[in-house]
Image (cartoon, coloured by chain):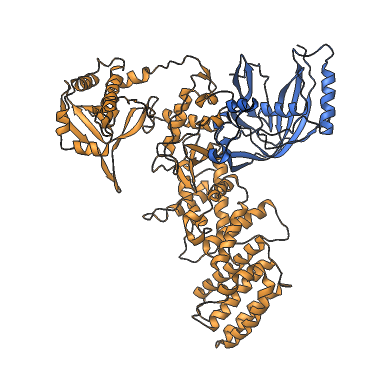
Chain colours: A blue, B orange
């Protein structure tokens, strides 16, 4: 596997964000700061190819951490796959009657957020012979500059859209807030292997507004 | 962060050797009835441990083995349970199930390792196996047991403690209880490998939630599952961490806890990294004082304001002990986190001081010096009823206090609206409006607007403020001219005067002439005219509309001027202005 040290920096911001804690997934509570997996999601929304895999190295927090509490109407049941299959083969109807499955779920979200994501990418096994790091780096730069994305990037949950812009190399970029604190164990990412999805956690520490993220395979990441 | 902080609090309490927290495998429970046995397992007596507490009788609390989560299946608790399980009493017309319950109870005791060696448990086993319970049923207290269905436990005659509290039994329980789960995953609270808890113990004590208890970590419907996981496996929290955080939270939420406050629909708990006085005092700062100690919150606030030098201060400004505030709201069988705040003790004390500074306003001598949060919020509710307080307002307000930010906009709007609806500016509402305006100015400073003061500020040029003062003087003129009126200009015109002054004030000024003309005391008339003149000097024209902050200033001006009248009357008796 080839590696590359090309760092990219993406400035993202949005009105609301919810990087949901796994243990409080039902009545959502957000982590204080963007998780590496959410950052990876934003990068993949801008550019993803089977040949590359994004690795987040650092997340800068640009706005003070503010919370807002909301209650939203959602549903408690899941649409039945059996019904869907039956409908596909020409019988029955797929329907989820929202009024019968109403669940009200509260959420403790982040309000008015801004981050700079420092990341790099690695080439995976599926990289072809003609693929080289520079090609993808250029592709990413072009897309980020013109605002192209495969799907609208979002901050944790799909309803909280994010706006993004590239921080050109060489520029100092937006400055993080001056805050240092221990954020406890934070979700790094979910690893899919052997058909199972295992979460991995790491000890997150905000240092002068910047969160250093160890690589997924590092010793600090347990799971 | 939240569960981790709670687990650390549990560790801290265990380290400090607090008797109120149960160790792993045990819990604190009320056991109203005790069966006393002798060494050979013969029945001696049936004790009642209940005492009168207010209107109810409450059993004494003991440290007993943890309760099993009871569902429809038969599952017996160890060494204590209700009469159905202990004796097989059938209360529901299902004798087969009652027998199953009794067998399960005996089997649980038999399964305890080392049970034969301990005299207490051996006696208990022989008593249960003999199944001669007629003496128990013949006891005069027995009908009460059946009626209340209260929990029963056992005690050896001559022992002060229960059988389940005997040293040998305690060790057997702590040591045993091995799980069949051998896979160990990383716990997301401690980071250590541990067996994942499938179901978490319930959190009791949150008002509005299920009485059986609710859960923070709960995945009870299929739409909440991810990646094909079910229940607790969606969020791997280890067994030890689960026990720690639920025990700590139940302890903080217990009845009469000094670390718990009910704010709107959210039960709020406070705790710190290390033992500090602020932990228990903070609730006194915000809650209504009890009837038998009405000055309790005044003393607490005064202690907050004391300088550390005098030694009576509540906190040191530089205290960097971490302080946590957690607000929990009920949602059927789940608990939602309404807010979560981490700060240092010093910072928090500063912010609370700031809050009390902001709500300070001139008051009549009989009004309380310190307003509790409840008083402030109920002043914004229609009819002054607590249930009409907007539900999220309390949580938002406490969050604004703790974070030191501006109060929610709804608060100013609610207070001004209430003023209009009730056509009166009361002391709590005036304090609220002043605090809202002060804090909003702090974060969006308007250089042209002077800040709102505690008492009358005659140099304040703001048109809303001046108009409020003018309104108060005009009302005074009317009151002096026609004493004993049922409806003054305040009842008729307050709403219009505070929102669209230009429609009302020219008419009021014309009316004022008639009122002043009616006054017999010419000195008073002259003084009133002089005051009106002084106030009118600062007003160029009557605005067509007053925006919300200016409506707030109108009510403050009105309030300040009226307070000034009453205090001056007290100092200079008679011919006032």
**What's the residue at 53%, 39% (across, down)?**
A100
Query: Residue B334 location in percent, x, y?
Result: 49, 36
Give me the residue at 62% from left, 71% from top.
Answer: B469
Q: Residue furthest front?
A: A90
Q: Is residue B8 left or right of residue B86?
A: right
User: In the rendered view, would you say A4 is above or below B529?
Assistant: above
Which quarter of the image is occupied by the N terminus of chain B? top right
In-front residue for pair B283/B575:
B283
On the rendered structure, is B241 left or right of A188? left
Q: Quadrant of residue A116?
A: top right
Quarter of the image where the C terminus of chain B is located:
bottom right
Q: Position of residue B410 (x, y in %)?
A: 60, 54
The location of residue B472, given as percent across then percent down, is 59, 73
Q: Residue at x 38, y 42 (%)?
A: B255
Q: Position of residue B228 (x, y in %)?
A: 57, 23
Comparing B90 with A66, the one in front is B90
Residue drawn at 74 percent across, 26 percent down: A44
Report the number of numbered marks.
Answer: 0
Q: Nearer the viewer, residue B340 or A195?
A: A195
- The answer to whether residue B168 is visible is no
Can residue B46 be spotted in the picture? yes
Q: Is A149 on the left-hand or right-hand side of A34?
A: right
Q: Is residue B29 above or below residue B521?
A: above
């Amino acid at each position: 596997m080839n590696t590359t040290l090309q760092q990219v920096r993406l400035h993202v911001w949005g009105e609301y964000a919810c990087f949901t804690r796994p243990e409080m997934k039902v009545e959502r509570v957000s982590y204080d700061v963007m998780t590496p997996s959410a950052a990876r999601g934003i990068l993949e929304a801008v550019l993803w190819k089977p040949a590359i895999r994004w690795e987040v190295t650092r997340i800068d927090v640009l706005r003070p951490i503010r919370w807002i509490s909301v209650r939203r109407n959602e549903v408690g049941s899941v649409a039945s796959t059996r019904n869907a299959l039956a409908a596909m083969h020409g019988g029955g109807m797929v329907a989820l009657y929202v009024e019968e499955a109403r669940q009200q779920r509260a959420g403790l979200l982040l309000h008015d957020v801004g981050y700079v994501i420092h990341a790099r990418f690695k080439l995976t096994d599926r990289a072809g012979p003609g693929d080289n790091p520079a090609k993808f780096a250029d592709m990413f730069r072009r897309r980020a500059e013109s605002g192209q994305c495969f799907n609208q990037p979002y901050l944790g949950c799909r309803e909280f859209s994010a706006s993004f812009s590239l921080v050109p190399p060489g520029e100092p970029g937006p400055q993080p807030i001056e805050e240092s604190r221990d954020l406890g164990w934070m979700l790094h990412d979910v690893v899919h292997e052997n058909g199972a999805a295992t979460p991995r956690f790491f000890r997150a520490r905000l240092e002068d507004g910047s969160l250093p993220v160890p690589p997924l395979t590092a010793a600090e990441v347990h799971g | 962060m939240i569960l981790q902080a709670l687990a650390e609090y549990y560790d801290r309490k265990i380290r400090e050797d607090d008797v109120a927290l149960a160790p792993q495998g045990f819990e604190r429970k009320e056991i109203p009835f005790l069966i006393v046995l002798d060494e050979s397992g013969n029945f001696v007596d049936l004790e009642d441990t209940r005492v009168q507490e207010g209107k109810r009788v409450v059993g004494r609390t003991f440290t007993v083995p943890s309760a099993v989560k009871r569902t429809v299946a038969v599952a017996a608790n160890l060494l204590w349970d209700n009469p159905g399980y202990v004796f097989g009493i059938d209360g529901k017309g299902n004798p087969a199930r009652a027998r199953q319950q009794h067998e399960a109870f005996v089997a649980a005791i038999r399964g305890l390792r080392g049970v034969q060696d301990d005299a207490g448990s051996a006696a208990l086993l022989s008593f249960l196996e003999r199944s001669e319970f007629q003496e128990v049923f013949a006891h005069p207290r027995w009908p009460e047991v059946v009626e209340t269905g209260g929990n029963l436990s056992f005690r050896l005659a001559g022992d002060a403690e229960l059988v389940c509290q005997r040293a040998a039994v305690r060790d057997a329980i702590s040591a045993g209880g091995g799980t069949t789960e051998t896979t160990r995953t990383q716990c997301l609270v401690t980071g250590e490998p541990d067996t994942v808890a499938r179901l978490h113990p319930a959190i009791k004590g949150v008002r509005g939630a299920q009485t059986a208890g609710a859960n923070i970590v709960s995945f009870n419907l299929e739409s909440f599952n991810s990646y094909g996981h079910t229940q607790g496996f969606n969020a791997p929290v280890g067994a030890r961490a689960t026990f720690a955080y639920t025990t700590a939270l139940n302890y903080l939420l217990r009845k009469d806890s000094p670390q718990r406050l009910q704010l709107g629909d959210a039960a709020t708990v406070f705790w710190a990294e290390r033992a500090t006085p602020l932990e228990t005092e903070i609730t006194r700062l915000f809650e209504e004082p009890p009837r038998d100690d009405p000055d309790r919150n005044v003393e607490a606030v005064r202690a907050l304001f004391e300088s550390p030098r005098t030694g009576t201060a509540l906190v040191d400004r530089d205290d960097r002990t971490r302080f946590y505030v957690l607000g929990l709201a009920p949602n059927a069988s789940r608990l939602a986190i309404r807010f979560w705040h981490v700060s240092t003790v010093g910072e928090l004390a500063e912010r609370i001081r700031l809050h009390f500074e902001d709500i300070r306003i001139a008051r009549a001598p009989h009004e309380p010096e310190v307003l509790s949060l409840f008083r402030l919020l109920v002043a914004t509710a229609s009819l002054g009823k607590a249930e009409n307080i907007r539900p999220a307002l309390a949580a938002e307000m406490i969050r604004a206090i703790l974070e030191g930010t501006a109060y929610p906009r709804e608060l100013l709007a609610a207070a001004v609206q209430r003023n209009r609806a009730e056509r009166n500016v009361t002391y709590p509402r005036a304090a609220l409006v002043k605090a809202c305006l002060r804090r909003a100015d702090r974060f969006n400073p308007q250089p042209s607007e002077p800040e709102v003061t505690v008492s009358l500020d005659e140099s304040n040029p703001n048109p809303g403020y001046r108009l409020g003062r003018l309104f108060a003087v005009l009302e005074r003129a009317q009151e002096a001219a026609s004493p004993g009126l049922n409806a003054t200009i305040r009842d008729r015109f307050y709403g219009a005067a505070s929102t669209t002054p230009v429609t009302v004030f020219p008419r009021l000024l014309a009316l004022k002439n008639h009122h002043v003309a009616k006054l017999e005391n010419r000195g008073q008339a002259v003084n009133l005219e002089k005051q009106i003149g002084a106030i009118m000097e600062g007003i160029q024209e009557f605005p067509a509309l007053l925006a919300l902050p200016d409506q707030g200033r109108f009510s403050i001006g009105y309030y300040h001027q009226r307070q000034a009248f009453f205090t001056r009357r007290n100092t200079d008796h008679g011919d006032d202005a």
